[in-house]
Image (cartoon, helix red, strand yellow):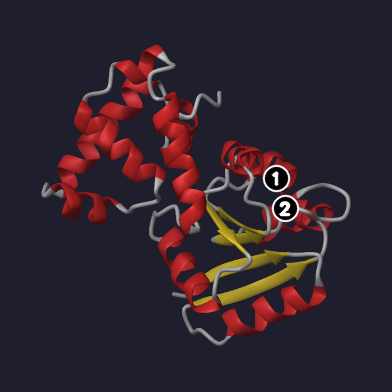
Amino acid sequence: MSISLIIVEDLKEVRDGLKNFIGLSSDFKVLDTFQTAEEALIEIPRLKPDIVIMDINLPGMSGIECIRLIKNKTPATQFMMFTVYENDEKVFEALKAGASGYLLKSTGLVQLIESLKELHNGGSPMSANIARKLVNVFQKNETNLPEIETLTFRENEMLQMLAKGLLYKEIADKMNISINTVKQHIHNIYEKLHVQNRTEAINKALGKK
């Protein structure tokens, strides 16, 4: 079954370009495209796409605010930021709002397709320099919170891999352990940090409550 998605982008040439290119892949079905967050806010809960490609700088409401308002209405929908912004504040705001992926518009279209598949399969794809920013901030802040101090070296290592967007299978391969062991470690991390998912764990590690 194809992966359904919606594109929210104010620039017509970018919006149409994404729609046409993604439409060439039999793995995806573009349900609709929107120019504003206000339109998307109404239509996304109705259409219930698997993925939303979301720009940040939109006329009126920002893409980040749109996700913040809509995430609880469509919990199964994954949000991929697709933007020119790479400053720390925007990245953290987007993740805190509920985005699971963050790609810069300089990303190649073929890489975008692969990242969308990865997102659908449970990953958190990010442009390399965005992932590096997260890891750098994580390393600076990892001892700032009492909960972080309770993590073992191995759990800290795994949390950094989560921040990089690695899939469970990739983590298992890197650490030479089974996927079930990875899941158990991650369950322990969530318990210790008092969080429910990957995004909350990364935000907690970054000191973003």
Q: Is residue 186 visible?
A: no
Q: Secondary structure at mark 1?
A: helix
Q: Which secondary structure lies at badge 2?
A: loop
Establish if 57 lies above or below 189.
below
Q: Nearer the viewer, residue 112 or 141?
A: 141
Residue 162 falls left or right of residue 178: right
Residue 143 found in image quarter:
top left
Q: Amino acid at mark 2?
A: Ile
Disc 2 to disc 1: CB gap under 8 Å: yes
Q: Residue 114 in the image: x percent, y percent?
A: 44, 71
According to the image, label 2 marks what residue? 56
Tell which residue pokes out farthest to the right in this image: 60
In this view, 116 is above or below 14? above
Q: Is residue 119 above or below residue 110?
A: above
The front one of 192 and 103 is 103
Residue to which mark 1 is pinned? 64
Residue at 76 percent across and 57 percent down: it is: 40
Please name the amino acid that badge 1 sits on.
Answer: Ile
Query: Is 203 in front, or is 32?
Result: 203
Tell me what residue is drawn at x 78 percent, y 78 percent: 13
**Which x, y percent locates residue 159?**
33, 36
Place residue 1 in its image quadrant.
bottom left
Gap between marks 2 and 1, in whole Å?
6 Å
Q: Position of residue 74 (x, y in %)?
A: 60, 48
Q: Residue at x 11, y 47 (%)?
A: 177
Circle 2 residues within 10 Å: few <14, some 14–19, many ≥20: many
What residue appears at the point 27 percent right and 39 percent down from the top-left corner? 158
N-terminal of the two: label 2 or label 1? 2
Which one is in front, 66 or 130?
130
Quarter of the picture holding the C terminus: top right
